[in-house]
Image (spheres, coloured by chain):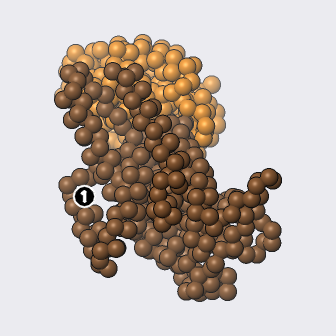
Chain colours: A brown, B orange
Amino acid sequence: MTTRGAVIKRVFIFIALLSLLAMPRLISGYQLRLLTEATIFSLYAVSFNMLLGYAGLLSFGHAMFFGTGAFATAIALEYIAGLPLLLAVAIATLFTALVGLLVGMLLLRVKGTPFALLTLAFNALFFSIGIKWSSVTGGDDGLIVNLPDIDLGVYNLNMFHEPTVYYLSLIILGSTIGCCWFFTRTAMGQSVLLIRENEERMRFLGYSTHISRLILFVLSGALAGLAGSFYAIMNAFVSLDAISLEMTTKVLLMTFMGGIGHFIGPVFGAVFYTYFQNFLSEMTDSWPLIMGLLFIAMVLMAPGGIAGLAMSAREWFRKRFTSGNSLKEEL
Amino acid sequence: MAILQAADIKKSFGGLEVLTDVNFEVEEKEKFAVIGPNGAGKTTLFDIISGKFSPTSGRVKFSGKDVSNIPAYRRARMGMSRSFQITNIFQKLSALDNILAGVRSRAGLRHHLFRQPHKNPALVRRSEEILDRVGLLGHRDTPAQDLAYGQQGALELGVTLSMAPKLVLLDEPTAGMSKQETTDAIDMIRRVTRDIACVIIEHDMNVIFSLADRISVLHYGVILACGTPEEIRNDQRVRDAYLGEETL
């Protein structure tokens, strides 16, 4: 059973990857943009879930990192002449990590509700900086991102070509999500999970729980910054919306709808949210109302999110078609 | 040299003095017990030794080093390990993962971003050895919450031993156990702590008298008497204050 299950899983992943690679041939430019956006938000939501699902830290300020990554990319490309695009992405990600370190050192002294409220306050602070410091951030007008080609020596990748942006996002963000999954299996990832389970005992087992939490916070912030950086590249434009409270709410909704109890949940959530929002906003201007109602319904009736529903469906099928005991997977 | 020294420990919460001038020493491999009625300050004393609180005044020395103001996680790394009165394990994790948490900490594998503890055969083997010592190897993959009460106590002990400590602090290791479970637990504690110094807090006199080399009686924050089990049994002040109604 396990071997057959593993084979089915591998075949499924292979087909999924293949179809993702074939997408630019199959769908329109607009649809491809939507898929790129879903990829970016997948990493954004996965990074958020590392705080929420793994460390049990509810943040209302994740957009401060997403926005910092987006703005840092635009600003780096504007002020540093001849800066290669991928180096700008790396600078933006590292800068966001640094911001995460500073904010984390201030915020992680508290837990629970005070932590959530302080993250909200910091997000508002970052947003005000974005508005007020308009000479650098462009204020309400936003910034146009000067996208240089990526020079591969023999071939130049033009970043205004939709399939190029799509492939670049898919490869870099996809492999980063893969790294996040690996992270959950490492000593550090497991320590974070154990600290959520029983922080006191971890301290008496020699773990410095503050440092663990800070490392995770920085990592999660940097990943959100990377997602934000690609958001700026995809749009060739950054506005304050990248750092706004709506962007924070968005990641909360995506992550909860996708399911915080499973690694892949936020990816489901991000894809679902992106497409469903697109679908709804074509029909009505009051799409947030419907999205909000759906969110409430899911929190009440399917607290495990889409991933939770998928797991239950899988269990149901397994019970129906096999008579043996089934393994339960967690995180 | 004594492995643990408590010198003039005082602890007050607000205006309330919970411990007054507590002094004792624990030798290498010695089994030292602290007894006393509820509210005598036993758990507070433990919290101070293990680093959950700092003393208001006085010193805690571990292996000759003053650790009074060193945080708990550093004391744990130095070789001091404590158990909890209310079983304090990782309920959702398997028995093996509970032990592995301490074993890998001991090996310095706490925050590594690449190495996977489960894939380190030496650490897994070491964890299995500890599971075996506390009689839980057969429940290697059972989630802690599904273990029987006595087995959870054994796992608590296993987690405490997982750091390969030089000194263990056992906070009422048989609390809430049945007579049979208590007898088994005493045997196990004696077996696994043969080469380790031990400080035990207990309520149950049978447990104390069968485990301890030396006993201190704590009464309203003051050490009333200190001596061998025989001396304590015959001490008139102790009888008056605490043991009076117990059948010894």
Total numbered circles: 1
Asked which quadrant contains residue A257, the reply is: bottom left
Q: Residue at x 45, y 39 (%)?
A: A15
Left or right of A244 in this view: B62: right
Q: Tell me where residue A119 appears, x and y as whole percent.
A: 47, 68
Q: Residues within 10 Å of mark 1 (few under 14, many from 20)?
A: some
Query: In this view of the protein, which residue sits in the foreground, B58 or A309?
Result: A309
In the image, what residue type sits under mark 1?
Met
Q: Is residue A285 above or below residue A318?
A: below
Left or right of B13 in this view: A175: right
Residue A296 visible in the snapshot: yes
Residue B4 visible in the snapshot: no
Asked which quadrant contains residue B215, the reply is: top left
Which image quadrant: the C terminus of chain B?
top left
Residue under label 1: A298
Q: Is residue A279 above or below residue B43?
A: below
Secondary element under disc 1, as helix, strand or loop, is helix
Q: Tell me where residue B103 appears, x and y as whole percent.
A: 52, 27
Which image quadrant: the N terminus of chain B?
top right
Q: Chain of mark 1?
A: A
Q: Tell me where residue B25 appears, x and y as whole percent.
A: 53, 30
Q: Residue at x 47, y 24 (%)?
A: B161
Left or right of A218 in this view: A20: left
Q: Tell me where residue A270 appears, x and y as whole percent.
A: 41, 58
Q: Is residue B15 above or below residue B183?
A: below
